[in-house]
Image: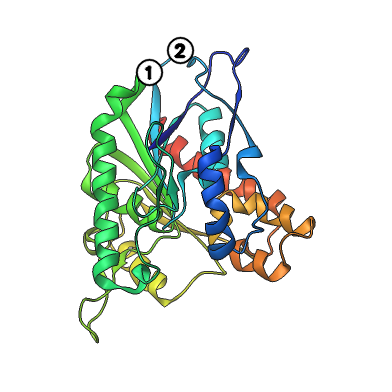
Amino acid sequence: MLTVFYPARSTRGYRRAPQMTARAAESFKGFAAYYHHLPAGVDWSATLTHSYADAPPAPGSRPVLLYSPGGTDPRTLGTGLAEDLASHGYVVVTIDHPGETSEVDIPGSELRTIQIPPTTPTDPVLSRLMMSTRFTDVRSVLSQLKTLGLPLDLRRIGIYGHSAGGSTAAQGLYENRAIKSAVNLEGYLDFLPLQPGEPDELYPIAQHGSDRPLLLAGTDGFRDARFDSSWSALLGHRGPVRRTEVAHANHWVFTDLGALAPQLQAAGLMTAEDRTSRVGAVDPAISVPLIRRTVRSFFDRTLKR
């Protein structure tokens, strides 16, 4: 299941799109309360985006960006950044990974909820299966871009993602020559060892480096030895790869929670501890434009020149 964001010729007469469909929002409530410590009473389908459903596209062939969300997170938690990129001339395709995503609402079909067990991130076999499936999803979406019916410049394709989606973006760059640049928003670059005592197995991109631009963006609140090891291995190849870090932040600051969690805390619906564990203490007036500017300027340099 995909959402495609693009510059519109006109929005007059079209309805603003909700962040989530009613079915997806109802299912997301329980997941969000359990996994993200968000209040269970929020109606996520009542949150309107800045996009208008089915509005006619503006003329002109445009670069394409694929977005892969974090492990178990729905693509809809990456709406704000996708909209910002689209407003600056990109066509952004956000991707769900069915079976792993908290919920996938495919029109005309039953709602598909998460199927992987909670132990997947620490299970070397299941986590490899999860990531291998994601890599295949990216290849599948790439093969279908021509069918979207939008004016796309398929010579200028980028990819970005958060957490497991960042890992997907980095390895997607390595595997697919059609992708010209990538942004990894705090995703590991290694597999867990299959046997106890063995070292983690680096992804091929970390083993061999990249000959195309790649940005590694992290936070000071989620940094650990595994990040430093796998990211340093990639940086050691001295290709067109650079690393940056958001201060006073935590892992989900790269998602819509970076803007929403502080508002929920201010409304008394989320504790300061839960807000910090998700996005850190950074002011969203600083983090949101910083992250948007960082990702957008990277793709402007690597895809628009």
Residue farthest bottom in this picture: 197
Q: Position of residue 103 (x, y in %)?
A: 44, 49
Q: Position of residue 51 (x, y in %)?
A: 58, 28
Whether residue 3 is visible here, answered yes or no, is: yes
Image quadrant occupied by the C terminus: top left
71 lies left or right of 145: right
Tell me which corner region of the image, top left, top right, bottom left or bottom right, holds residue 205: bottom left
The residue drawn where x is 52% and y is 17% is 55
Q: Which residue is mark 2?
A: 59
User: CA–CA distance between discs 1 and 2?
Assistant: 7 Å
Q: Secondary structure at mark 1?
A: loop
Image quadrant occupied by the N terminus: top left
In the rendered view, tell whether residue 138 sits above or below residue 258.
Answer: above
User: Please, what is the three-letter code of the amino acid marked with disc 1?
Assistant: Pro
202 lies left or right of 83: left
179 lies left or right of 64: left
